[in-house]
Image: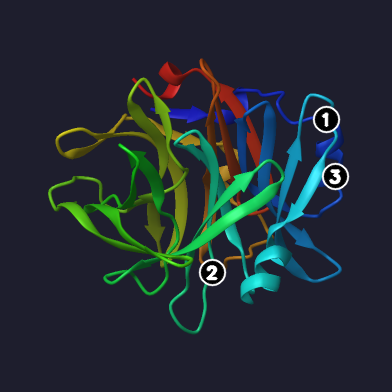
Amino acid sequence: MFIRLKNYYSDVIPERLKKILSEYKYAFNPSFVAYNRKKYLAIRLYDGKLNSIISLLFVWGDDERIQTINLSEHFNNREGISKVSDPKLFVMNDALWGVFNTGYTESNNSIVLFKLKGENINKYYFCDYAERSYVEKNWAFYSVNNELFALYSISPMIVLSAKKFKGNRIIFEQYCVNENTQYSNYSIGSPMVNVDGRLLFVAHKKIYCLGKRLYLGRPFTFTHIVEPELKARKVFLMHSIMALFGCVKKFNKNLISCTYFSGISYTGSEIQLSYGINDVKWGLVTVMPDDLWR
């Protein structure tokens, strides 16, 4: 079954912020989270003056006064990072966190985990894993009994655990591997949200044609009890039928089209799901958990 997210709606983004985003030619891959009476939106934007894609974080409260953190500038100034790709926000251990990767580089790229306190980046860590891929994209972090874990891969299912904190680096080791997971050509998409003890997220189904890729979403449930377990509902998510055909502008020449799931937030009864449309537009919808996960 296919679900078209264009048929859903959300009003969590204020008009003033929509106006700011509309000033950029391309705005995509948003990650929205509501936390501690504030709302946060990390998003990638094409800056025409720089002829480059930047990542910004917007913060606002009930008065809708919008503050901006330039994530690209922040991490370039502190660590010389040239690219902050796909920043994703999530709540873990009653604190607000974010994660991004540093894109394609000449050597191994990096996964960077950072913690937010109000409108400030409180701390950040580079995540190390000895058996990592050359280019890392998305890790889904979670905590059990104050121990830090990350879902690293869906097929095979690989879960990592944090073994050592060394300065601003975290050393991860393999915690669990299940070679029998039946989800081929899937990758991690959104972060996770805890709903009644279940960790819900959206993964990407990659469909290949003549060396090019098409991305759809699929709702997954992850549990970490005795042994970590993954389950997927038999539905696929897209923005619309028209979006499946892609668009003329392509930052990634190997992309046919994508509904790219970059954000998820749970506010007690509703889920706000944020996603990018073909690397040129953004979408955000409000759904009930049982609409997509059962």
| Residue under numbered circle 3 | 20
Q: Residues within 10 Å of mark 1 (few under 14, many from 20)?
A: some
Distance from label 3 to label 1 (Cα)? 13 Å
Distance from label 2 to label 1 (Cα)? 32 Å
State the residue at coordinates (46%, 67%): 167
**Front residue of this view, candidates 1 and 282:** 282
The amino acid on which the numbered mark 1 sits, given as a three-letter code, is Glu
| Residue under numbered circle 1 | 64
Query: Residue 235: horizontal and vertical position, in percent?
Result: 37, 30
Work out whether 91 lies above or below 36: below
Q: Residues within 10 Å of mark 3 (few under 14, many from 20)?
A: few
* Mark 2 or 1, closer to the camera: 1
- Quarter of the image with the N terminus is top left
Mark number for residue 103? 2
Distance from label 3 to label 2 (Cα)? 25 Å
The amino acid on which the numbered mark 2 sits, given as a three-letter code, is Gly
State the residue at coordinates (49%, 17%): 288
